[in-house]
Image: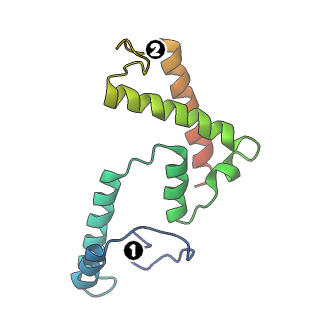
């Protein structure tokens, strides 16, 4: 919100992806800094965040760079950023397969992919660890 309202400066390479219609709505909502303009900006951000998931590691990095936190993975995990991104990517891929494909095994046969409680607890532990480290840098 601070970026859209002009209260926070960001690097020139920071991208938010405003459509022309959104820019028009923000400009016509009211004078800069007005409550009407902030309401319009909040509406845009809410709509945008409703469409974006920011689950995959590169998407998380992009989202954080939009608000001025760049290179989060190499900063938070200087010696093993790639391994941490891979671990999270595997969990996200499995989650997406469960949600969008009924967790069917990609090999022919139509059976579901097995998952144990240890698999689930391991995924939770990995996500908690990654989020805890990332949070220290935000």
- Toward the viewer: 117 or 31? 117
Residue 19, percent across and down? 32, 72
Residue 9, percent across and down? 52, 77
**Is 91 rendered above or below residue 44?**
above
Q: Is residue 35 left or right of residue 11?
A: left
Q: Which residue is mark 1?
A: 4
**Is 43 rendered above or below residue 29?**
above
Q: Going from the N terminus, do you reach mark 2 or mark 1 first?
A: 1
Helix, strand or loop under label 2: loop
Residue 42 in sight from this viewpoint: yes
Mark 2 near mark 1, Cβ–Cβ under 8 Å?
no
Identify the residue at horizontal 48%, vertical 69% (top origin). Answer: 15
Q: Nearer the viewer, mark 2 or mark 1?
A: 2
Quadrant housing residue 44: bottom left
Disc assigned to residue 22: none
Identify the residue at horizontal 55%, vertical 41% (top origin). Answer: 131
Helix, strand or loop under label 1: loop
Outermost residue to the front = 108
Residue 8, percent across and down? 49, 75
Q: Which residue is mark 2?
A: 115
């Amino acid at each position: 919100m601070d970026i859209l309202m002009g209260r926070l400066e960001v690097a020139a390479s920071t991208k938010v992806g405003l459509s022309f219609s959104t820019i028009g709505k923000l400009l016509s909502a009211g004078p800069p800094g007005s409550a009407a303009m902030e309401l319009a900006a909040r509406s845009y951000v809410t709509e945008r965040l409703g469409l974006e998931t920011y689950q995959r590691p590169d998407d998380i990095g992009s989202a954080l760079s939009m608000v001025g936190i760049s290179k989060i993975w190499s900063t938070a995990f200087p010696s093993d950023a790639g391994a941490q991104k891979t671990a999270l990517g595997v969990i996200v891929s499995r989650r997406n397969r469960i949600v969008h494909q009924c967790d069917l095994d990609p090999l022919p046969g139509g059976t579901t992919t097995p998952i144990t409680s240890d698999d689930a607890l391991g995924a939770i532990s990995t996500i908690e660890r990654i989020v805890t480290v990332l949070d220290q840098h935000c």
